[in-house]
Image (spheres, helix red, strand yellow):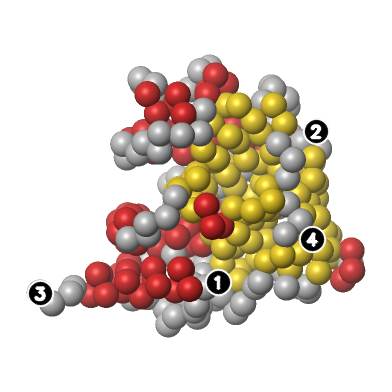
Amino acid sequence: MKKTLIEKTSDKLVNAFLKNKLISPIPRQYSKKLVNAQRFRKLCESKIKEPIVGFKAAGTGIPVMKKLKEKEPFYASIYKRNVVKSGRKVKINKGTLGIELEVCYQIKKTFFSSKGLITAKNISKFISYMAPCIEVVGYRQKKKGITSFGDLCSDFGANVRFLVGKKKKYQKINIGNLKTNIQNKKINQSVDGNTNTVFINPINSLKFVLNKIKKDKINLEKDFWVFTGSTVGVVPIKGKGLYAGKIDKLGVAKAIIN
């Protein structure tokens, strides 16, 4: 049976994901509208037979949401191959968009058997740990810039690598107003941020992701990570070397850009 265009396109992108290659941009019909991009993302993810260790929230910056006329963020699956310890090397290419600093949470597997919606009141019982992390974002396509959330969503949520800092036992802290900073001292680049730029706050972003994966009837049957979105926007990588990200009260995450 002849393969459809969507099947052929998803095969190409999956191959690029698995082999760290760049391909020509995928047809706009799969990336322009978020609803079509979600469908395309799920098709691509279904073809990767590797362990999923968590999910990322993306498009969590409210000003960006307004600018691109999007109603809400989106989520994407994160594979074991793309989550490493803080301080590791990350090779970038022409598809790289930038670097981000975010809050991540480790969620107990009991979440999957829970009934009903996740709310601000009941969310704490599902969280075991929290940590700072750096995310390197980019495409597996020869394209630049962002015209819609679909651009990011259709390409595995634009995740390249997560570098997770030291995790701490979860406790309620003022997560909605913590100062953050990411810098590369060698090239004198420094960007300040705040956790309040993440879809109101990182816990609200976490709640959003958990309710989406519930709705999509996903069950990993194990503890997993949720990465809640950037506190500093997408910071352009202006040079190679060590990028260090610090979130007040939470700690530090580092990435060596090659």
In front of the other: label 2 or label 1?
A: 2
Q: Is residue 137 above or below residue 172?
A: below
Whichever of callouts 2 and 1 sits on the residue coming sooner in the sequence is: 1
Question: How far apart are the two marked residues, 3 and 4, measured between alpha carbons?
Answer: 49 Å
- In this rendering, is residue 51 above or below 224? below
Nearer-N-terminus badge (3/4): 3
Pinpoint residue 217: horizontal percent, then vertical percent: 31, 36
Mark with earlier residue (4, 2): 4
Secondary structure of the residue carrying numbered label 1: loop
- Judged left or right of residue 41, residue 54 is right
Q: Nearer the viewer, mark 1 or mark 3?
A: 3
Determine which of the numbered discs, if any, sits on residue 243 in the image.
4
Spatial CA distance of label 2 from label 3 is: 57 Å
Give x and y (percent) for residue 35: 32, 54
Disc ID at residue 1: 3
Residue 116 position, x and y percent, is 36, 21
**Left or right placement of residue 168 versus residue 65 in this view:** right
Look at the image and tell me whether residue 138 can be seen: yes
Q: Amino acid at mark 3?
A: Met
**Number of numbered discs overlaid on the protein picture:** 4
Q: Which residue is mark 2?
A: 249
Distance in Å between CA atoms under marks 4 and 1: 22 Å
Residue 65 appears in view? no
Residue at 35 percent of width and 20 percent of height: 115
Q: Which residue is mark 1?
A: 145
Identify the residue at horizontal 79%, vertical 60% (top origin).
243
User: Callout 1, which amino acid?
Assistant: Gly
Label 4, secondary structure: give it: strand
